[in-house]
Amino acid sequence: MIRVFSNSEELSLAAAEAFCAIARDATAARGRCMVVLAGGSSPRRLYELLATQPYRNRVEWHCVEFFWGDERAVSPDHQDSNFRMAREILLERLAIPQRHIHRIQAERDDRDAAARDYQDEIARAFGVSASGTPPMFDVVLLGMGADGHTASLFPGTEAIAETQRWVVSHHVLALAVARTTMTPRILNAAYYVLFLVAGRDKAETLAQVLEGPRDPQRLPSQMIQPTSGALAWFVDRPAAANLKTAYSSEGQSRDPGR
Ligand code: 6PG
């Protein structure tokens, strides 16, 4: 489903509503809510909203556990750290206990070991085997870059084609940086994947991702197609500028049945 909002504030408010509903349902059904957070600027306002009323009181935060879809190769207190952003504007404000915060240790020298350890940590938190089928996160938040990447699945990188591992670390040539990222295999296992996309600079790419031919090597966001879960795109009007279909804020389904 695709929902288009008049501006990024409306988008963030709707995302906060959606998050609270997902968390309530997950907690009622499974006694907890396993969340994958996104980095980048798009989810910032959502995180701020969730930490303040009325949203703050709508979630049983002691039942929520936090993971990250990707991380930059920096220390956890670095200004570029996805963990730091979430810690400062969401986790600290909600006093989330350490045992429910599962960060990627992407600052380690051996990043491959850190990626493998993160897979083990996910498995432990869910009580499943790290060599089996990936567990189902209750909600995965994702952003999309103007080049079509999501999480740290960048165009033309091997991480896109990874079919076994849940987490990999790789060098992103285009940015000349190392990134650690969840793979499509585990992201697509989620109950609910929510993309947040805002800004005019995303318009051309978003139209290609949603309405263009399938080309995931060039547009990795197209890899995100939950196996049995739901997929929602929350988009602001500037980002939706090049879409051929006129979507409302109520949302229309591209895929009947979803
Ligand atoms: C990151 C991300 C990344 C991000 C997109 C969109 O670590 O940067 O997780 O995938 O979501 O690049 O970023 P913006 O929201 O800043 O446009």
Image (cartoon, rainbow, N blue to C red):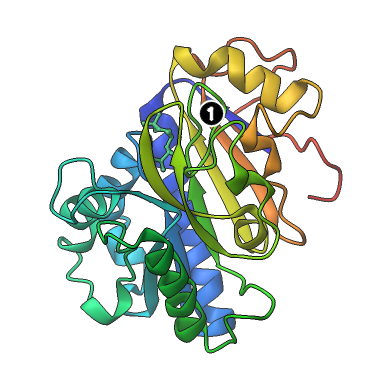
Report which residue position mark 1 lands on: 235
Quadrant of residue 97 within the rendered picture: bottom left
* Quadrant of the image occupied by residue 106: bottom left
Quadrant showing the N terminus: top right
Give residue 227's position: percent from left, percent from top: 76, 59
Is 255 on the left-hand or right-hand side of 168?
A: right
Instruction: Please rate how many residues cluster around mark 1, counting C-alpha atoms within 10 Å: few if below 14, some from 14 to 19, many from 20.
Output: many
**97 is higher (above) or lower (below) than 146:** below
Residue pictured at 59% horizontal, 31% vertical? 155
Relative to 245, 44 lies left or right:
left
Q: Looking at this view, is 24 or 195 the one in front?
A: 195
Q: Position of residue 95 (x, y in %)?
A: 17, 70
| 152 vs 146, nearest the viewer | 152
- Residue 93 shows in this picture: yes
**Quarter holding ligand 1:** top left
User: Is residue 52 visible to us here?
Assistant: no
SS at circle 1: strand
Residue 202, horizontal then vertical, whole percent: 51, 18
| 52 left or right of 258 in image | left
